[in-house]
Image (cartoon, rainbow, N blue to C red):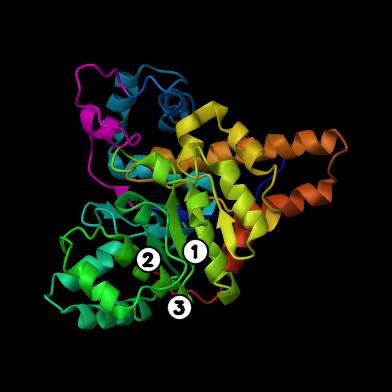
Amino acid sequence: MNDIGPLVDHHCHGLVTEDLDRAGFEAMMNEADHASPLATTVFDSMLGVAIRRWCAPVLDLEPHVPADEYLARRRELGAAEVNRRLLAPTGIDRFLVDTGLTPERLTLPDRFTAGTSHEVVRLETTFESVLATGAAAGEAGEQLVERLQGSGAVGAKSIAAYRVGLALPASKPADDELAAALGEVDPRRVAHPVVSGWLAWTAVELGMPLQLHVGYGDNDVDLADCDPLRLTAFLRATQERGVPVLLLHNYPFHRHAAYLAQVFDHVFMDVGLATHNTGALSPALLRESLELVPFGKLLFSSDAFGLAELYHLGALLFRRGLGDLLDGLVEAGEMSGADADRLAALVGHENAERVYGLGTARVAG
């Protein structure tokens, strides 16, 4: 199998450091709600099978042990040891961490590995913290800009997909439009198309690489509004600025994202989150994305949240899937070995290093 080499995880979250019971563990396995008595265990999924197949041996268990046995061993070792064991083999040496999701419960992943972490600041939660101070609309906008400029973050992230969908405007909303919109929203959870558009445009104007949640997420999203093709007007309008726009996750719209990355110079994509959730079937996502996406536009991401298993599987399944795909192309004479090595290095780490300017980025901590 092709040696993918070191990885930069360009979008992830922190790790939970407390021991989890079965309900707590399953609640972090994917994006679903599992309170209903009609639901089966989340281990009855490709992700559950992958955890029992690939993570169990790292915890000194046989592959495919029952879920209860796996979780008992996890508690026996303790969260810190589990996190250390599962992160160490990933080969991830840089983590770009979205710090806007339950930061009080999570720790940076580099606590358990030799890698380093860099912050990606979440636009909506940052703006909500500004509004919580009671700042008026004009002052709130200025304070948001000051916070972004002083954050030391390597990029910004928008969750407009969760709040209003992805039909972001082709021009930045005016200050009076922002003020009117802020008069209509709950400042504790800002959900307004004008505000989402203003935040995204502000990040671009500041030259911050802009991550956008796309596609698959929890039941807060209306998936029909999360097709990245809805971003076309925004992408067309921002292309001349040359600020990277990074489409995250993308399932089931990964082919649409690959098209956008091909036709817009500043657009990049990943298939994080979907990789570990689809388990052994994940190579299809990489294959379908590579149909169109230029090799310099695809990035590795785990989108791991809470569980070290998701980092472990995100990296392992990505390495196996891409490595096997490249080996097959080389064996068929469709690609040279040098081309395969070049593609692996670009996707694994070089694209992220170039897009985020990681050579000069400040390490979070």
Q: Tag on residue 9? A: none
From which residue to which does the magenta span run?
A: 13-41
What is the x, y in percent for residue 27? 26, 34
In the picture, measured across the screen, residue 355 lies left or right of residue 329, that is left
Which of pointers 2 and 3 indicates the residue nearer the eye?
A: 2
Secondary structure predominantly adopted by residues drawn in magenta: loop
In the picture, measured across the screen, residue 297 lies left or right of residue 357, that is right
What is the x, y in percent for residue 128? 21, 66
Query: Marks 2 and 3, how far apart in space?
Result: 12 Å
What is the x, y in percent for residue 359? 56, 73
* Residue 237 to residue 299: above or below: below
Q: Which residue is mark 2?
A: 197
Of mark 1 and mark 3, the one earlier in the sequence is 3
Q: Which residue is mark 1?
A: 234
Mark 1: few, some, or many residues within 10 Å (few <14, many ≥20)? Answer: some
Residue type at mark 3: give it. Glu
Q: Which residue is mark 3?
A: 205
Q: Residue furthest right?
A: 333
Q: Which residue is at 77% across, 47% downward?
A: 340
Residue 85 in view, yes or no: no
Q: Which element is circle 3 on? A: helix
Residue 353 in view, yes or no: yes
Q: Which element is circle 2 on? A: helix
Of mark 2 and mark 3, the one earlier in the sequence is 2
Q: Which residue is at 42% across, 61% downward?
A: 168
Q: Which element is circle 1 on? A: helix
User: Nearest the camera: 37 or 312?
Assistant: 37
